[in-house]
Image: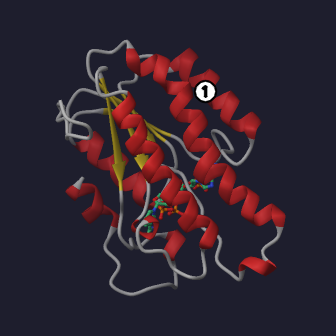
Amino acid sequence: MSKGKIKYMKTKNHKVVITGASRGIGKALADKFEENSNEVIRLSSKDADLTTSQGRKNLISTLIEKHSDMTVFINNAGIQVNGEFEKLSYKDYNKELEININAVVELSKGVLPILKDKKESALINVSSALAIQPKSDAPIYCGAKAFVRLFTKSLRYQLENTSIKVFDIVPPLVETDMTNGRGKGKIKPEALAKEF
Ligand SMILES: NC(=O)c1ccc[n+]([C@@H]2O[C@H](COP(=O)([O-])OP(=O)(O)OC[C@H]3O[C@@H](n4cnc5c(N)ncnc54)[C@H](OP(=O)(O)O)[C@@H]3O)[C@@H](O)[C@H]2O)c1
């Protein structure tokens, strides 16, 4: 199979674990998976704070202990901080890096042992159209999403001869709390989930 060729998989009867599923895109994806006869475990910041290393470690332990039968894992949780880069505090931009990059890397690594022994499984990371066409007031976010896009693509190549399919979702502007009061021409999260 050539590098990056799309691999299809069945879409029913999976156990799907999704971060950031309390609202927005994650909730819409979770609802869609459930509608399509999949069991869905919905995570939010109440289950684990993904901006902290400890939160991520705890979550990985929980996944290994309680959800080692999962066949799909979705790295969806994310935050976006807007403003002038020069004025951003370390706390703000570091949180953005932690959840948008470190959580994706560490959780991807943490779930690989679970996914690799399944007949068919998938790792799905949520990037953004801003990874391709960045906007001026969110340089950390845009850079982080570009990281997610290339990280995911590279991992797809690395795992292409395994049972794990690696996908990224590259949403356009979607109407969620993240984009509240910003931008025009937003699509509904449900419309995005339907396309996926
Ligand atoms: N909206 C867009 O236009 C758009 C476009 C492209 C890509 N995306 C990406 O799509 C994903 C979802 O975005 P969204 O618009 O649906 O965002 P959202 O409505 O703001 O929802 C964010 C989700 O992430 C969770 N989350 C936030 N901080 C967290 C933390 N510290 N630890 C764990 N979970 C945390 C939230 O949980 P709580 O409810 O517990 O806070 C919530 O479930 C993100 O990766 C985003 O970058 C969004």
Question: Residue 154 appears at what percent x and percent y?
Answer: 41, 40
Question: Residue 172 appears at what percent x and percent y?
Answer: 35, 70
Q: Amino acid at mark 1?
A: Ile
Question: Residue 192 appears at what percent x and percent y?
Answer: 28, 62
Image: 179 above or below 25:
below
Residue name at image x 60 percent, y 74 percent: 138
Question: Residue 120 appears at what percent x and percent y?
Answer: 26, 21
Q: Quadrant of residue 80?
A: bottom right
Q: Which one is in front, 138 or 132?
A: 132
Question: In the visual, does 125 lie left or right of 81?
Answer: left
Looking at this view, name the residue that lies furthest to the top. Answer: 117
Q: Quadrant of residue 119?
A: top left
Say which element carries label 1.
helix
Q: Which residue is mark 1?
A: 60
Question: In the visual, does 103 lie left or right of 68?
Answer: right
Q: Which one is in front, 76 or 177?
A: 76
Residue name at image x 71 percent, y 37 percent: 55
Image: 162 above or below 95:
above
Image quarter in which the N terminus is found: top left
Q: Which one is in front, 80 or 23?
A: 80
Q: Dot 1: within a 10 Å radius of its alpha carbon, few (fewer than 14), some, or many (20 or more) residues?
A: many
Question: In the visual, does 145 lie left or right of 192?
Answer: right
Residue name at image x 49 percent, y 59 percent: 146
